[in-house]
Image (cartoon, grey):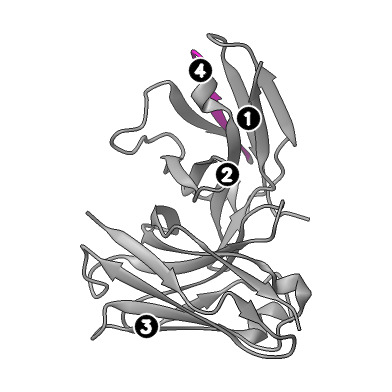
Amino acid sequence: QVQLQESGPGLVKPSETLSLTCAVSGYSISSAYYWGWIRQPPGKGLEWLGTVYHSGSTYYNPSLPPLNSRVTISVDTSKNQFSLKLSSVTAADTAVYYCARSLYSGGFSYFDYWGQGTLVTVSS
Amino acid sequence: QSALTQPASVSGSPGQSITISCTGTSSDVGGYNSVSWYQQHPGKAPKLVIYDVNSRPSGVSNRFSGSKSGNTASLTISGLQAEDEADYYCSSHRRDLAVVFGGGTKLTVV
């Protein structure tokens, strides 16, 4: 059974860097799937942040500058996990952050397994 | 403003069918068969209910079906049940190697 679990601080101060890790179990992160981060501000919809492949190739949301210049996603195959860093956070970055497994088949096809999500609040 | 347009809300009675639309452009929905739909209950993570326009993951009820015409994809839920009340999001691959979501539709079973 594939399981994903987000971890990281639930409270981050403005202007600091938000760092989250997604631990994957039941499936090797080095196999054929991609791994993504999606967030959801309170009461709002889903927003794709980016996706990483085990080779280290990354794909970021180009539609929300300067968001894409603040986002860094990386993968650690030795620990079977991947990570998200979001720099210079503001209150607008307060959201539930999800990690998820993604298939690429002629395009980014779908997210089939999701973590439970972790609420990150940006506040001093 | 979301990249894909969905109605904010739809409603239906138990046993009825409803359809939720998802409108994009030829750079996303219209150009790829990578349209997926997610069901999200309050406080829970999204759950994949349709992928690749009209395929159902194992374990998802056959009351859920998907289709696409041009730049608009649709999710149909037949035989509405109280447990179907949730938020629904569509998603698509976009030409610039991105993933785009719709703004979400709140389904109320009245």
Nearest to N terminus: mark 4 or mark 1: 1
Q: Residue at x 51, y 75 (%)?
A: A59
Q: Which residue is mark 1?
A: B20
Nearest to N terminus: mark 2 or mark 4: 4
Start and end of the magenta stretch?
B72-80
Q: Position of residue B48 (x, y in %)?
A: 43, 44
Say which amino acid is labelled 4.
Answer: Gln
On the same chain: label 4 and label 1? Answer: yes
Is residue A46 positioned above or below A58 on the image? above
Q: Quote the CA–CA distance across marks 1 and 3.
A: 36 Å
Say which amino acid is labelled 3.
Answer: Val
User: Looking at the rendered structure, which numbered label has been put on residue B90?
Assistant: 2
**Cβ–Cβ under 8 Å for marks 1 and 2:** yes
* Mark 3 neighbour density, 10 Å: few (under 14) some (14–19) many (20 or more): many
Observer-side mark, 3 or 4, equals 4
Q: Which residue is mark 3?
A: A75
Q: Which residue is mark 4?
A: B81
On the same chain: label 3 and label 4? Answer: no
**Cβ–Cβ under 8 Å for marks 3 and 4:** no
Q: Quadrant of residue A83?
A: bottom left
Q: Quote the CA–CA distance across marks 2 and 3.
A: 27 Å
Q: Residue at x 66, y 86 (%)?
A: A69
Nearest to N terminus: mark 1 or mark 2: 1
Q: Quote the CA–CA distance across marks 1 and 2.
A: 9 Å
